[in-house]
Image (cartoon, grey):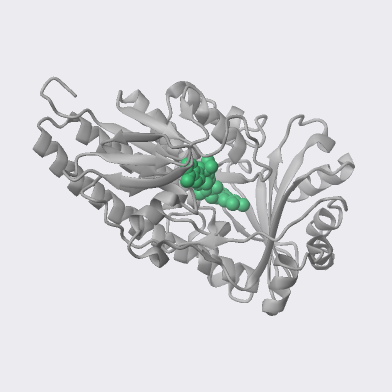
Amino acid sequence: MSEDGVKETHILIIGAGVTGLVIAHALQQAGIRYTIFESEDAGKKRPKEWTMGIHWSLPLLERLLPPRLASRIATDASVDPSLNYDEPPNNGAYIYDGVTGEVLKDLTPPTGRIVRVSRRKLRALCSECIDIKHGHVLQDVTTSEDSKTVTAKFMNEDSYTGTLLVGCDGPRSAVRSCLFKSEPGEAQAQAMQGGVTTSMAISYPDPEIARYVREKTHPVWCMSISPLLFHFMSMQDVPDPDRPETWRFFYFDSWLAKDQDEVEEFRDRGGDILAALKERGGKLAEPFRTALLSIPDETELRYSELIYWVAKPWDTRKGLMTLAGDSAHPMPPFRGQGGNHAIQDAHNFVEIVKQISQTTGEEAKSSLQAKAIQEYSDEVAKRGGEETNLSLKNGMMSMQYVDFKESPYMKQGLNKG
Ligand SMILES: Cc1cc2nc3c(=O)[nH]c(=O)nc-3n(C[C@H](O)[C@H](O)[C@H](O)COP(=O)(O)OP(=O)(O)OC[C@H]3O[C@@H](n4cnc5c(N)ncnc54)[C@H](O)[C@@H]3O)c2cc1C
């Protein structure tokens, strides 16, 4: 309680991915009380790794983090700390025609820069100086009868009460399920249909192959489009710029399945997805041909399920519960936008919380919170839903190739939808 008897603002953040962590940092800098919970145990390393291009949201990310961390994004979280991300071509990317090998589009932004980060490294950077309550799997959320407080209950039987809860718990969000408790089907994420997708982080033991693939494509990231394959590639990690055999590459590959049986072959029946990928890759132009044919044979590849939820507005229970990041708009990563929108959500959310925490008088505070959090949520649902639809469209066009020149990627580049 504050001196005037009004409950102190206390934010419960569910999920310590990038969204939850940047919200925690911004609240910490503003002196606003929060508690952040994470289902995973401390120190657990996820087997799956990927990279994210932070482009239009980079200035927002730099504002959300304390300056001592913001200044380390390009060095400590990027895929190659030795690069200068203010200089072309490092501050952009290319889209290639995988059949001819020609550049179809240069994605370098006219102003600003793109920093490609390792999700793992960015999460580690954003975890610094944040006290995360690990091993807390959210089970349920309830609000008080007077609509003044919200309580999170966890599987380990802990429970915490605050004045506002934000679900940053990713694509299969438990908070989203709680928001749509009375109509559970409405919160359900769907699997993207029609394609076969796989991803990997690999090294080439032969340094000449690693050097050739990187020099002939892009120092940071690019993609190639063809009727056979949508192939995305980026550096995952460059521990030693002078030793290409130490470099790790991240690949994300998708192709249009001829029928559902082909999907099931790889998804359910253990079909050899690496052999299928190499067969397709072998028909591409150089250097994509070599990049794909040289994937080490022992690489274990799995079918990746791409899930999405076209956001619909949710009732925030008088401003007590909301969502941010992938929990609000899980989308297939075909336009590289999910993380950028997550950072925009975090920024918008924190700005509103600052206003709420500065408001005096219990009734004024509650009514501002009810109105502003509902408005925040409606905007996230609209923006997130639109981007999810664009990413789905872009994904199908990337795999189909014929209409690719009309795709959001070619028309809008990396701009916000
Ligand atoms: C292959 C790939 C490439 C991508 N490329 C890009 C890109 O180029 N640009 C871009 O902007 N975006 C990209 N994205 C999307 C981006 O990675 C996500 O939008 C972003 O990581 C979302 O972060 P988040 O914190 O919202 O969710 P998450 O990273 O999923 O974090 C959610 C956290 O909540 C925890 N959690 C889950 N359930 C519970 C529970 N019940 N209780 C407590 N905690 C829970 C999880 O353990 C996790 O730590 C890409 C995604 C993929 C898969």
Residue 79 drawn at (x, y percent): 65, 37
Residue 221 drawn at (x, y percent): 66, 48
Tell me if residue 210 comes above or below residue 360 in the rendering: below
Q: Is residue 34 visible?
A: yes
Quarter of the image that includes the N terminus: top left
| Viewer-proximal residue among 372 and 188 | 188
Classify residue 92 as left or right of residue 383: right
Q: Residue at x 21, y 31 (%)?
A: 357
Q: Residue furthest bottom?
A: 259
Q: Is residue 59 visible?
A: no
Rendering quarter of residue 329: bottom left
Q: Residue at x 54, y 64 (%)?
A: 410
Rendering quarter of residue 207: top right
Tell me if residue 224 comes above or below residue 135 in the rendering: below
| Viewer-proximal residue among 87 and 398 | 398
Residue 167 drawn at (x, y percent): 39, 45
| Viewer-proximal residue among 350 and 10 | 10
Q: Residue at x 35, y 59 (%)?
A: 180
Residue 208 drawn at (x, y percent): 88, 42
Quarter of the image that includes the C terminus: bottom left
